[in-house]
Amino acid sequence: MGVMEEKSAKRKKRANLKKVILETLYSSGALAVALLAPNVLGVIAKSMRTVSARQGESINAARKRLIVSGLVAFQDGKLTITPKGERELRLLDSDKYRLKRPKRWDGRWRVLIFDIPEKRRHLRFKLRASLAKVGFVRVQDSVWLYPYECEEFVALLKTDFHIGKELLYLIVDSLEGDTKYLQHFGLK
């Protein structure tokens, strides 16, 4: 295994379920849950089809981050969305949503590859429109490119569109002919 492969293999995968939790809380108004939130796991499990133990840990960690960031609050045994959380959810659903760009590029490309069957072609069009809207660049019809970390956004796409293995998220250390993409994104 080469040096670049080892670096990529060491990178830990992390999925933020912020939008899923916020939408769940928003749609239900106030969701009564215990501190460990077993009911939230059940509700989110239905939207994600299956939840493994690792995904359950990710959901709990995401819930804690949302509480710390002030997007949800735990009051009187209920987990509720705050006004700040409602604003964030509206922003996530709006056309103004943009992925966060760090000050420095890490030199890695994020590539999305999808293979959605013809019978679900309407979903392909919605997915392409969503990717273009947030700033991805089309390499081929089903191959899209972005220079910054966007794993959370991809997790939201998979959840919203109910696609799992049909959408692959790749982190690429080098890309042949990337000069035009570097120029497009204003990178060195």
Image (cartoon, rainbow, N blue to C red):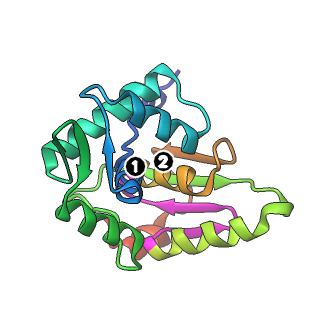
Q: Is residue 37 left or right of residue 171?
A: left
Find residue 64 and report its horizontal and vertical position in percent.
Answer: 22, 36
The reply to whether residue 13 is visible in this rendering is no
Q: Secondary structure at mark 2?
A: helix
Find residue 30 and report its horizontal and vertical position in percent.
Answer: 30, 51
Q: Amino acid at mark 2?
A: Ala
Q: Residue under circle 1? A: 152
Q: Which residue is located at x 41 percent, y 79 percent?
A: 95
Q: Is residue 38 left or right of residue 120?
A: left
Q: Tell me the quarter of the image containing the C terminus.
A: bottom left
Residue 82 falls in image quadrant: bottom left
The reply to whether residue 185 is visible in this rendering is yes
Q: Which residue is located at x 53 percent, y 70 percent?
A: 130
In the rendered image, residue 61 lying in the magenta stretch gets the answer no
- In the rendered structure, which segment of residues is drawn in magenta? 134-150
Q: Which residue is located at x 49 percent, y 52 percent?
A: 154
Find residue 44 and report its horizontal and vertical position in percent.
Answer: 48, 40
Q: Give neighbour class at mark 2: few <14, some 14-19, many 20+ (Cα, 10 Å).
A: many
Q: How many marks?
A: 2
- Front residue of this view, candidates 175 and 126: 126
Q: Is residue 108 left or right of residue 35?
A: right
Q: Residue under circle 2? A: 155
In the rendered image, residue 143 lying in the magenta stretch gets the answer yes
Circles 1 and 2 in contact, beta carbons < 8 Å: yes
